[in-house]
Amino acid sequence: MYCVGIDIGSTASKVAVLKNSEIVHTMLMNTGFSSIATSEAILKNLNESGINKENSKIIATGYGRVSVPYASKTITEISCHARGADFLFKEAGTVIDIGGQDTKAIMLNNGRVSKFIMNDKCSAGTGKFLEIMSNRLGVTQDELSRLAMKGQAIAISSMCTVFAESEVISLIGKGTPREDIAFGVIESVVNKVVQLVSQVYNDKYFLTGGLCDNRYLIERLGKALQNPVTSIPMARYAGAIGAALYAEN
């Protein structure tokens, strides 16, 4: 039997397939306008890979988990991210997940959630914030980080994404170097994440989600937290891996 975890996020959807507790297949796609259409596309891809409802157990999680009618069960993303991170990092600590629409900080103890906090009221400090600011500067998110490495300290003080975008527009109008604005954008995200994470303080941090490949952001986050932040490319799939592990039980 295959154990399948499907994480339908607000921006990206991830799939992890386990067999005998080993990851044998992963999948990543944009969620797009319809999470229902995304779940149907995932099922088609799984079927083409020889994984179907007859030879697998499927658990769904994430923002759009109710849009996966063929899942046998849905589980919250907090539980799934915690379990997936424990599987990947095998250490106690605090998991930081910077998602498209929210940011989560989850304290792990013996593989279980001992405390968590979540920002789901404002897109500041999330992947959506970076997407909006990158678009405003006419660059990709990878290019934004490369520009920020060359930038000088500049503060973007607005706590709201809409007002922060207005602040960036004003800086552009004043002729502020794009590198400096990029630096300010990254620091703004880091500062908001640190404010959240400070409520579940730890001395070990693990980053999951779509920004786990952003080495510059990880470095700045570690400096602000005064402790290293560990991540690996597979951490993007932490929620899906956690769901698949729940399917094993």
Image (spheres, rainbow, N blue to C red):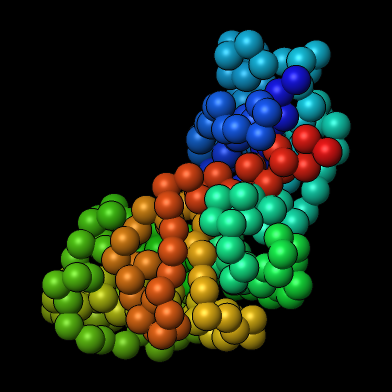
- Name the image quarter holding the N terminus: top right
Q: How many numbered circles does the render carry?
A: 0
Q: Is residue 39 above or below residue 12?
A: above
- Name the image quarter holding the C terminus: top right
| Camera-nearest residue between 249 and 165 | 249
| Camera-nearest residue between 235 and 97 | 235
What x and y, as percent, mark residue 115? 74, 75
The residue positioned 58% from the left and 19% from the top of the image is 45
The residue positioned 54% from the left and 56% from the top of the image is 89
The residue positioned 55% from the left and 67% from the top of the image is 96
What x and y, as percent, mark residue 16? 60, 34
What x and y, as percent, mark residue 248? 78, 35
Q: Is residue 248 left or right of residue 103?
A: right
| Camera-nearest residue between 224 and 170 | 224
Q: Is residue 121 left or right of residue 190?
A: right
What x and y, as percent, mark residue 105? 62, 71
| Camera-nearest residue between 62 and 160 | 62
The residue positioned 80% from the left and 48% from the top of the image is 75
Q: Is residue 242 above or below residue 134?
A: above
Q: Is residue 64 left or right of residue 228?
A: right
Q: Is residue 81 visible?
A: no
Q: Is residue 132 left or right of residue 203?
A: left
Q: Is residue 131 visible?
A: yes
Q: Name the image quarter holding residue 78.
A: bottom right
